[in-house]
Image (cartoon, rainbow, N blue to C red):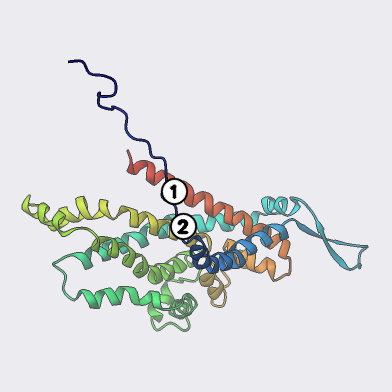
Amino acid sequence: MTTTALDAPSTTAPRRTNRTKVGHKSAIAVFVAPFGLLFALFYLLPIGYAVWQSTRVVERDGTFGPPTEVFGGLAQYQNVIADEAFWESVGRVLLFGVVQVPIMLGLALVFALLLDSPLVRGRRFFRLAFFAPYAVPGVIAAIMWGFLYSPNLSPFRPLTAEINFLSADLVLWAIANVVTWVYVGYNMLIIYSSLLAIPTEVYEAARLDGASQFRIAWSIKIPLVMPAIILTAIFSIIGTLQLLAEPQVFRTFTSSVTSDYTPNLLVYTTASVPNPSLAAAFSVVLALATFILSFTFLKVTQRKAFQ
Protein backbone atom coordinates (compact mmCIF):
# COMPACT_ATOMS: atom_id res chain seq x y z
CA MET A 1 0.00 0.00 0.00
CA THR A 2 1.41 3.33 -1.00
CA THR A 3 1.05 6.53 1.00
CA THR A 4 0.19 9.65 -0.88
CA ALA A 5 1.30 13.13 0.02
CA LEU A 6 -2.18 13.87 1.23
CA ASP A 7 -2.11 10.93 3.64
CA ALA A 8 1.32 11.76 5.08
CA PRO A 9 1.31 13.46 8.49
CA SER A 10 2.14 17.13 8.44
CA THR A 11 5.53 18.00 9.93
CA THR A 12 5.09 21.75 9.98
CA ALA A 13 3.51 23.52 12.93
CA PRO A 14 0.40 25.55 12.19
CA ARG A 15 1.06 29.22 11.73
CA ARG A 16 -0.50 31.80 13.95
CA THR A 17 -2.44 34.00 11.67
CA ASN A 18 -4.30 36.16 14.15
CA ARG A 19 -3.01 37.87 17.27
CA THR A 20 -5.13 38.60 20.25
CA LYS A 21 -6.43 42.09 19.91
CA VAL A 22 -6.50 44.34 22.90
CA GLY A 23 -9.99 45.55 23.54
CA HIS A 24 -11.19 48.65 25.32
CA LYS A 25 -8.28 50.79 24.16
CA SER A 26 -10.25 53.91 24.93
CA ALA A 27 -10.75 52.78 28.53
CA ILE A 28 -7.01 52.12 28.90
CA ALA A 29 -6.26 55.57 27.56
CA VAL A 30 -8.69 57.13 30.04
CA PHE A 31 -6.99 55.45 33.00
CA VAL A 32 -3.45 56.20 31.78
CA ALA A 33 -4.16 59.82 30.81
CA PRO A 34 -4.16 61.31 34.37
CA PHE A 35 -0.77 59.80 35.16
CA GLY A 36 0.61 60.79 31.78
CA LEU A 37 -0.61 64.35 32.18
CA LEU A 38 0.85 64.74 35.67
CA PHE A 39 4.09 63.03 34.61
CA ALA A 40 4.46 65.42 31.70
CA LEU A 41 3.57 68.54 33.70
CA PHE A 42 5.62 67.91 36.82
CA TYR A 43 8.52 65.81 35.49
CA LEU A 44 9.15 66.13 31.75
CA LEU A 45 8.24 69.80 31.46
CA PRO A 46 10.52 70.95 34.35
CA ILE A 47 13.39 68.92 32.90
CA GLY A 48 12.87 70.49 29.49
CA TYR A 49 12.66 73.96 31.03
CA ALA A 50 15.88 73.39 33.00
CA VAL A 51 17.71 72.32 29.85
CA TRP A 52 16.37 75.37 27.99
CA GLN A 53 17.27 77.69 30.88
CA SER A 54 20.81 76.32 30.95
CA THR A 55 21.37 77.63 27.42
CA ARG A 56 20.56 81.23 28.36
CA VAL A 57 23.04 83.97 29.24
CA VAL A 58 22.49 87.50 30.48
CA GLU A 59 23.70 90.44 28.42
CA ARG A 60 23.59 94.17 29.19
CA ASP A 61 23.49 97.13 26.86
CA GLY A 62 26.37 99.05 28.37
CA THR A 63 27.57 98.97 31.96
CA PHE A 64 24.27 99.95 33.56
CA GLY A 65 21.88 98.78 30.86
CA PRO A 66 18.92 96.53 31.58
CA PRO A 67 19.74 92.81 31.61
CA THR A 68 18.36 90.67 28.81
CA GLU A 69 18.47 86.89 28.41
CA VAL A 70 19.77 85.60 25.09
CA PHE A 71 20.75 82.22 23.73
CA GLY A 72 24.27 81.40 24.81
CA GLY A 73 24.75 77.84 23.60
CA LEU A 74 27.07 75.87 25.89
CA ALA A 75 28.54 78.90 27.65
CA GLN A 76 26.99 77.96 31.01
CA TYR A 77 28.32 74.42 30.73
CA GLN A 78 31.79 75.82 30.14
CA ASN A 79 31.38 77.72 33.41
CA VAL A 80 30.35 74.48 35.12
CA ILE A 81 33.42 72.64 33.84
CA ALA A 82 35.68 75.48 34.98
CA ASP A 83 34.04 75.76 38.43
CA GLU A 84 36.40 74.10 40.92
CA ALA A 85 33.94 74.46 43.81
CA PHE A 86 31.38 72.33 41.96
CA TRP A 87 33.79 69.48 41.32
CA GLU A 88 35.08 69.65 44.90
CA SER A 89 31.49 69.29 46.13
CA VAL A 90 30.95 66.33 43.80
CA GLY A 91 34.11 64.67 45.11
CA ARG A 92 32.95 65.33 48.67
CA VAL A 93 29.60 63.60 48.20
CA LEU A 94 31.26 60.72 46.33
CA LEU A 95 33.54 60.18 49.33
CA PHE A 96 30.46 60.46 51.52
CA GLY A 97 28.69 57.78 49.47
CA VAL A 98 31.63 55.37 49.33
CA VAL A 99 31.77 55.29 53.14
CA GLN A 100 28.18 55.93 54.22
CA VAL A 101 26.18 53.80 51.74
CA PRO A 102 27.89 50.44 52.50
CA ILE A 103 27.60 51.06 56.25
CA MET A 104 23.93 52.00 55.98
CA LEU A 105 23.01 49.06 53.75
CA GLY A 106 25.07 46.70 55.90
CA LEU A 107 23.14 47.75 59.00
CA ALA A 108 19.85 47.52 57.11
CA LEU A 109 20.71 43.97 56.01
CA VAL A 110 21.72 42.92 59.53
CA PHE A 111 18.52 44.35 61.03
CA ALA A 112 16.39 42.67 58.36
CA LEU A 113 18.07 39.31 58.99
CA LEU A 114 17.55 39.69 62.73
CA LEU A 115 13.86 40.43 62.24
CA ASP A 116 13.54 37.38 59.98
CA SER A 117 15.39 35.10 62.39
CA PRO A 118 13.25 32.70 64.46
CA LEU A 119 15.61 33.24 67.41
CA VAL A 120 14.64 36.92 67.89
CA ARG A 121 11.73 37.84 70.16
CA GLY A 122 9.60 40.97 69.91
CA ARG A 123 9.81 41.37 66.14
CA ARG A 124 6.95 43.88 65.96
CA PHE A 125 8.57 46.17 68.50
CA PHE A 126 12.00 46.10 66.87
CA ARG A 127 10.51 46.49 63.38
CA LEU A 128 8.74 49.64 64.54
CA ALA A 129 11.81 50.85 66.47
CA PHE A 130 14.12 50.43 63.47
CA PHE A 131 11.67 52.14 61.10
CA ALA A 132 10.66 55.00 63.45
CA PRO A 133 13.58 57.35 62.55
CA TYR A 134 12.40 57.39 58.92
CA ALA A 135 9.12 58.91 60.12
CA VAL A 136 11.08 61.93 61.36
CA PRO A 137 11.46 64.56 58.58
CA GLY A 138 15.04 65.02 57.45
CA VAL A 139 15.13 68.67 58.49
CA ILE A 140 13.89 67.85 62.00
CA ALA A 141 16.42 65.04 62.31
CA ALA A 142 19.25 67.36 61.21
CA ILE A 143 18.18 70.00 63.76
CA MET A 144 18.00 67.42 66.53
CA TRP A 145 21.43 65.98 65.76
CA GLY A 146 22.83 69.48 65.31
CA PHE A 147 21.88 70.27 68.91
CA LEU A 148 23.40 66.96 70.04
CA TYR A 149 26.66 67.79 68.25
CA SER A 150 26.86 71.43 69.38
CA PRO A 151 29.41 71.84 72.21
CA ASN A 152 27.36 74.57 73.92
CA LEU A 153 23.92 72.97 73.55
CA SER A 154 24.52 69.24 73.67
CA PRO A 155 23.46 67.24 76.75
CA PHE A 156 26.67 65.26 76.24
CA ARG A 157 29.04 68.15 76.91
CA PRO A 158 31.93 66.04 78.26
CA LEU A 159 32.01 64.22 74.89
CA THR A 160 31.45 67.23 72.63
CA ALA A 161 34.03 69.22 74.56
CA GLU A 162 36.66 66.62 73.69
CA ILE A 163 35.50 65.85 70.14
CA ASN A 164 34.21 68.63 67.93
CA PHE A 165 31.84 66.81 65.61
CA LEU A 166 31.11 70.06 63.77
CA SER A 167 34.74 70.72 62.81
CA ALA A 168 35.83 70.77 59.19
CA ASP A 169 37.36 67.29 59.54
CA LEU A 170 34.34 65.59 61.13
CA VAL A 171 31.25 67.46 59.97
CA LEU A 172 30.90 65.35 56.80
CA TRP A 173 30.75 62.18 58.91
CA ALA A 174 28.42 63.87 61.39
CA ILE A 175 26.05 64.43 58.46
CA ALA A 176 26.60 60.82 57.37
CA ASN A 177 25.51 59.67 60.82
CA VAL A 178 22.26 61.64 60.49
CA VAL A 179 21.52 60.19 57.05
CA THR A 180 22.31 56.68 58.27
CA TRP A 181 20.09 57.08 61.35
CA VAL A 182 17.16 58.24 59.20
CA TYR A 183 17.34 55.82 56.27
CA VAL A 184 18.51 52.52 57.77
CA GLY A 185 14.93 51.62 58.72
CA TYR A 186 13.61 52.47 55.25
CA ASN A 187 16.16 50.22 53.51
CA MET A 188 15.68 47.54 56.15
CA LEU A 189 11.96 47.41 55.37
CA ILE A 190 12.63 46.85 51.65
CA ILE A 191 15.09 44.01 52.37
CA TYR A 192 12.83 42.52 55.04
CA SER A 193 9.88 42.48 52.62
CA SER A 194 12.05 40.57 50.16
CA LEU A 195 12.97 38.07 52.89
CA LEU A 196 9.30 37.43 53.63
CA ALA A 197 8.76 36.49 49.97
CA ILE A 198 11.21 33.55 50.18
CA PRO A 199 9.31 30.23 50.35
CA THR A 200 9.57 28.46 53.72
CA GLU A 201 10.27 25.17 51.94
CA VAL A 202 13.76 26.47 51.11
CA TYR A 203 14.55 26.95 54.82
CA GLU A 204 13.07 23.56 55.73
CA ALA A 205 15.26 21.81 53.16
CA ALA A 206 18.33 23.61 54.49
CA ARG A 207 17.51 22.62 58.08
CA LEU A 208 17.11 18.98 57.01
CA ASP A 209 20.61 19.18 55.55
CA GLY A 210 21.89 20.39 58.92
CA ALA A 211 22.44 24.06 58.06
CA SER A 212 22.67 26.50 60.97
CA GLN A 213 20.86 29.83 61.10
CA PHE A 214 24.06 31.65 60.15
CA ARG A 215 24.61 29.30 57.21
CA ILE A 216 21.02 29.80 56.03
CA ALA A 217 21.40 33.56 56.25
CA TRP A 218 24.73 33.59 54.42
CA SER A 219 24.07 31.01 51.71
CA ILE A 220 20.32 31.36 51.12
CA LYS A 221 18.83 34.60 52.41
CA ILE A 222 21.48 37.09 51.28
CA PRO A 223 21.78 35.72 47.70
CA LEU A 224 17.99 35.65 47.30
CA VAL A 225 17.52 39.24 48.52
CA MET A 226 20.38 40.59 46.42
CA PRO A 227 17.96 42.31 43.98
CA ALA A 228 16.47 44.24 46.92
CA ILE A 229 19.96 45.20 48.11
CA ILE A 230 20.84 46.44 44.62
CA LEU A 231 17.62 48.46 44.53
CA THR A 232 18.38 50.13 47.86
CA ALA A 233 21.95 50.80 46.70
CA ILE A 234 20.68 52.60 43.59
CA PHE A 235 18.29 54.68 45.71
CA SER A 236 21.17 55.51 48.04
CA ILE A 237 23.47 56.59 45.20
CA ILE A 238 20.79 58.93 43.89
CA GLY A 239 20.11 60.27 47.39
CA THR A 240 23.81 60.85 48.05
CA LEU A 241 24.25 63.11 45.02
CA GLN A 242 21.05 64.96 46.00
CA LEU A 243 22.22 65.69 49.55
CA LEU A 244 20.78 69.07 50.57
CA ALA A 245 18.61 69.27 53.70
CA GLU A 246 21.17 68.06 56.24
CA PRO A 247 24.08 70.29 55.08
CA GLN A 248 21.76 73.28 54.81
CA VAL A 249 20.59 72.83 58.41
CA PHE A 250 24.15 72.24 59.65
CA ARG A 251 25.18 75.61 58.20
CA THR A 252 23.32 77.20 61.14
CA PHE A 253 25.46 75.25 63.60
CA THR A 254 28.92 75.49 62.06
CA SER A 255 30.86 77.53 59.56
CA SER A 256 32.56 74.37 58.30
CA VAL A 257 29.60 73.76 55.97
CA THR A 258 29.92 76.38 53.24
CA SER A 259 27.42 77.41 50.59
CA ASP A 260 29.08 75.06 48.07
CA TYR A 261 29.54 72.10 50.41
CA THR A 262 27.40 69.75 48.28
CA PRO A 263 26.33 70.02 44.63
CA ASN A 264 22.67 70.61 45.47
CA LEU A 265 23.60 73.25 48.04
CA LEU A 266 25.70 74.99 45.39
CA VAL A 267 22.75 74.87 42.97
CA TYR A 268 20.47 76.35 45.62
CA THR A 269 22.96 79.11 46.43
CA THR A 270 23.57 79.91 42.76
CA ALA A 271 19.84 80.16 42.05
CA SER A 272 19.47 82.53 45.03
CA VAL A 273 22.10 84.98 43.73
CA PRO A 274 20.11 84.96 41.37
CA ASN A 275 21.74 83.15 38.47
CA PRO A 276 19.11 80.62 37.33
CA SER A 277 20.87 79.79 34.07
CA LEU A 278 24.08 78.65 35.77
CA ALA A 279 22.06 76.84 38.44
CA ALA A 280 20.16 75.02 35.68
CA ALA A 281 23.45 74.00 34.04
CA PHE A 282 24.70 72.68 37.40
CA SER A 283 21.46 70.71 37.76
CA VAL A 284 21.67 69.18 34.27
CA VAL A 285 25.27 68.09 34.79
CA LEU A 286 24.42 66.67 38.22
CA ALA A 287 21.43 64.77 36.80
CA LEU A 288 23.62 63.27 34.06
CA ALA A 289 26.26 62.27 36.62
CA THR A 290 23.58 60.63 38.77
CA PHE A 291 22.21 58.72 35.81
CA ILE A 292 25.66 57.52 34.71
CA LEU A 293 26.63 56.34 38.20
CA SER A 294 23.31 54.58 38.82
CA PHE A 295 23.27 52.95 35.37
CA THR A 296 26.91 51.83 35.67
CA PHE A 297 26.32 50.34 39.12
CA LEU A 298 23.22 48.50 37.85
CA LYS A 299 25.06 47.08 34.83
CA VAL A 300 28.07 45.98 36.88
CA THR A 301 25.91 44.21 39.47
CA GLN A 302 23.81 42.54 36.78
CA ARG A 303 26.92 41.30 34.98
CA LYS A 304 28.26 39.79 38.20
CA ALA A 305 24.91 38.18 38.93
CA PHE A 306 24.89 36.32 35.60
CA GLN A 307 28.51 35.16 35.80
**Separation of disc 2 and disc 1 at Cα?**
9 Å
Q: Give the quadrant of residue 36.
A: bottom right
Q: Quadrant of the C terminus?
A: top left
Is the Cβ of the residue at disc 2 closer than 8 Å to that at disc 1? yes
Residue at horizontal 28 percent and vertical 64 percent from the top:
192
Q: Confirm whether residue 135 shows in the render.
A: yes
Q: Disc 1 marks which amino acid?
A: Phe
Q: Quadrant of the N terminus?
A: top left
Tell me the SS state at disc 2.
Answer: helix
Disc number placed over residue 297 in the picture, else none = 1
- Tell me if residue 1 comes above or below residue 276 in the rendering: above
Residue 7 lies, in percent from the top left, at 25, 24
- Tell me if residue 117 comes above or below residue 297 in the rendering: below
Farthest-out residue, top: 2
Residue 294 lies, in percent from the top left, at 48, 52
- Residue closest to the eye, 257 or 49: 49
Side of 221 where 130 appears, left or right: right
Q: Disc 2 marks which amino acid?
A: Ile
- Tell me if residue 11 comes above or below residue 34 in the rendering: above
- Residue closest to the eye, 146 or 105: 105
Q: Give the quadrant of residue 33.
A: bottom right
Residue at horizontal 34 percent and vertical 35 percent from the top:
14
Residue 118 lies, in percent from the top left, at 14, 66
Residue at horizontal 51 percent and vertical 69 percent from the top:
167
Tell me the SS state at disc 1.
Answer: helix
Mark 2, Cα crowd under 10 Å, few <14 / some 14-19 / many 20+, is many
- Residue closest to the eye, 138 or 142: 138
Disc number placed over residue 237 in the picture, else none = 2
Mark 1, Cα crowd under 10 Å, few <14 / some 14-19 / many 20+, is some
